[in-house]
Image: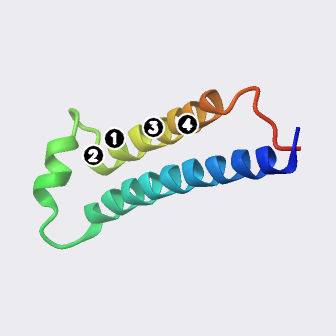
Amino acid sequence: MQTDEKFAIIKRKTRQRLLFAVVTMTLYFSFALNYLEGSAALIASFGIGGVPGPLVMFVGLVLLFILLELIFLFLNRGQRAG
């Protein structure tokens, strides 16, 4: 593999990782909104029975983060820069 091809792969993976990092940080920020004043509507809308909304959202976000990482790995399978 040529050096230019390696750099192209690294650049593409870096752009993808940046996109995934921005999505992850946005989701973390949405979770932090649960603890601000006036977030009662958000907390109530996620509640399931006796389980509080922030807990449901936390579990959902953990699963979503795992899914995002699996998507990233799936998109980059079989491509090596080294």
Q: Please tell me in which quadrant of the rendered image residue 35 appears.
A: bottom left
Name the spot of residue 27 as percent of width and height, x first.
38, 53
As shown in the figure, which amino acid type bears the numbered disc 4? Ile
Out of 41 and 13, give the one closest to the viewer.
13
Residue 54 position in % (x across, y down): 31, 51
Mark 1 nearby-residue class (10 Å; few <14, some 14–19, many ≥20): some
Sequence order check, earlier mark of 3 and 2: 2
Whether tag 4 and tag 1 are in contact, CB under 8 A, the answer is: no
Q: Which mark is residue 66?
A: 4
Residue type at mark 3: give it. Leu
Q: Residue at x 15, y 48 (%)?
A: 44
Q: Is residue 25 left or right of residue 50?
A: right
Can you identify the residue that label 3 sits on?
A: 64
- Identity of the residue furthest to the bottom in this view: 37
Q: Which mark is residue 4?
A: none
Across and down, in percent, residue 31 comes to: 34, 57
Marks 3 and 4 in Cβ contact (< 8 Å): yes
